[in-house]
């Protein structure tokens, strides 16, 4: 309960009075303050591909958000478009999760009831050549974030984890109670280590909640075509690569191997629409409000598609050719990876709704309307 100018504000969403507030107890001001005083959700890395899509769904659901991002792998234009699409404004701070004082200022200015933590480096190949950067940023940054959260009394975190924590030895469909950690690259190991850190934090203080969301392969874009995946340089991931071939930015797709033990020899993955993934985060925040402890959930469709399946689906959904050749396998790839998403359905009440055609059509709409991504 916070008192400002003699007006009692329950669960103040801001610890400083909104600028220009007068001291009169005019009912309108009371209403305005109550509106202002709702709790907020902090979204770290909210300017990125999955973060920006999640911000839109949070705003659509009437949630108040605060966003931080260091713009390492994101552009301010993405958030401008989030505000345009949601028709709502929200506080944004350019802040690195390793900046303890910067984080303290955010928590001092807003009543944060939960954190959705996307911020992190995520290029598998880059992590092999720059492991210290990945451990410093992803692991060190998360430790700093959790310390500041605890100081501020905010002990609910929804963590952007990855199916990569299941490593190479588990058979698909992957289940949350399978062993994790046998990971083949530093990026994946940071995700595994952070999961273990959050589990330890929950054991050390039973007031904490950590929801560990293990993403499979997010693709697609918001139906407006205004926001989407905008990788720096040549894409590592399949769908942005397909989209750039289809628009003529890249000459052809090299399929990394067709001699895997799958129905057509090419790699099988569980592709999930980014908006379904975003919805999963809203369900995870709701869960965190009424539960404590650490809990992992797969966010996937439970269906696997091969590289050739996805190429054909993209060509058919959009009526555009995707020239492709078979190339050598990519180091570190596994043949098949898809989820058993039943726990998220049972416990979170979440299930992916969009199919591979929607994913291909929405990816293409974003790419064809934004040939240079956000660099217009
Ligand atoms: C999918 C399939 C490739 C590109 C990675 C990370 C994971 C997560 C998602 C961050 C594979 C094939 C790809 C190409 C191809 N990242 N492919 N030609 O490897 O399943 O997962 O991205 O959270 O942690 O490991 O996704 O899109 O790179 O590959 O043939 O030019 O497409 O071999 O079978 P992946 P991907």
Image (tube, rainbow, N blue to C red):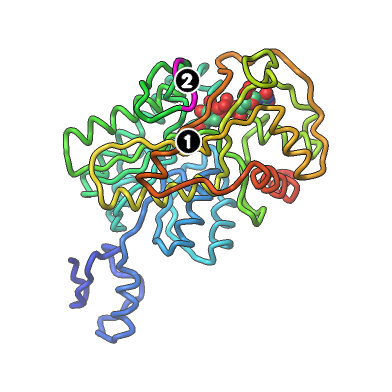
Q: Describe the element under mark 2 as helix, strand or loop.
A: loop
Task: Please say whether residue 36 is one of the residues in the magenta stretch.
Answer: no
* Of marks 1 and 2, the one in the foreground: 2
- Dividing the picture into quadrants, the one containing residue 191 is top left
Mark 2 packing: few (<14 Cα in 10 Å), some, or many (20+)? some
Q: Quadrant of ligand 1?
A: top right
Q: Residue 310 location in percent, x, y?
A: 69, 33
Nearest the eye: 194 or 165 = 165
Q: Residue at x 65, y 57 (%)?
A: 224
Residue 123: in sight, yes or no? no
Residue 355: in sight, yes or no? yes
Q: Residue at x 82, y 29 (%)?
A: 323
334 up-or-down from 21: above or below: above
Confirm or deny contact between disc 1 and disc 2 (CB under 8 A): no
Mark 1 packing: few (<14 Cα in 10 Å), some, or many (20+)? many
The part of the chain drawn in magenta is: 169-173
What number is the disc on residue 310? none
Respond yes or no on whether mark 1 lies under 8 Å from ligand 1: yes
The residue wearing badge 1 is 215
Q: How many marks?
A: 2
Q: Residue at x 31, y 74 (%)?
A: 33
Nearest the eye: 375 or 300 = 300
Q: Residue 332 location in percent, x, y?
A: 55, 15
320 up-or-down from 275: above or below: above
Nearest the eye: 106 or 32 = 32
Question: Which tag, 1 or 2, sits closer to the chain's start?
Answer: 2
Q: Residue 149 location in percent, x, y?
A: 26, 45
- Dividing the picture into quadrants, the one containing residue 180 is top left
- Which quadrant holds the N terminus? bottom left
Q: Residue at x 56, y 18 (%)?
A: 334
- Residue 39 vs residue 326: left or right? left
The residue wearing badge 2 is 171
């Amino acid at each position: 309960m916070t008192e400002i100018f003699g007006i009692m504000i329950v669960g103040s969403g801001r610890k400083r009075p909104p600028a220009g507030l007068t001291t009169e107890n005019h009912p309108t001001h009371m209403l305005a303050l109550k509106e202002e005083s709702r709790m907020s959700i902090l979204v770290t890395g909210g300017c990125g591909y999955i973060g920006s899509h999640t911000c839109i769904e949070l705003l659509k659901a009437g949630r108040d958000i605060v966003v931080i991002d260091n713009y390492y792998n994101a552009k301010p234009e993405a958030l401008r478009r989030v505000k345009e699409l949601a028709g709502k404004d929200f506080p944004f701070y350019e802040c690195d999760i390793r900046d303890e004082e910067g984080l303290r200022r955010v928590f001092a200015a807003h009543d944060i009831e939960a954190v959705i933590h996307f911020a992190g480096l995520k290029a598998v190949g880059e992590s092999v050549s720059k492991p210290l950067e990945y451990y410093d940023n992803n692991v060190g940054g998360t430790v700093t974030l959790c310390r500041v959260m605890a100081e501020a009394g905010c002990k609910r975190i929804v963590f952007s984890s990855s199916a990569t924590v299941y490593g190479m030895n588990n058979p698909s469909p992957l289940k949350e109670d399978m062993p994790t950690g046998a990971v083949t690259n530093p990026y994946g190991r940071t995700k595994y280590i952070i999961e273990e850190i959050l589990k330890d934090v929950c054991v050390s203080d039973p007031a904490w909640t950590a929801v560990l969301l293990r993403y499979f392969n997010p693709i697609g874009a918001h139906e407006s075509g205004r926001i989407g995946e905008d990788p720096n340089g040549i894409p590592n991931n399949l769908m942005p690569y397909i989209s750039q071939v289809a628009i003529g930015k890249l000459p052809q797709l090299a399929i990394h191997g067709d001699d895997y033990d799958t129905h057509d020899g090419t790699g099988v993955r569980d592709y999930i629409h980014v908006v379904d993934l975003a919805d999963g985060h809203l369900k995870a925040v709701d869960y965190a409000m009424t539960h404590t402890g650490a809990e992992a959930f797969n966010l996937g469709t439970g269906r696997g598609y091969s590289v050739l399946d996805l190429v054909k689906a993209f060509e058919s959904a959009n009526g555009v050719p995707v020239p492709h050749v078979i190339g050598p396998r990519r180091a570190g790839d596994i043949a098949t990876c898809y989820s058993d998403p039943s726990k998220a359905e049972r416990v979170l009440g979440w299930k992916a709704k969009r199919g591979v055609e929607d994913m291909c059509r929405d990816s293409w709409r974003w790419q064809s309307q934004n040939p240079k991504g956000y660099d217009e």
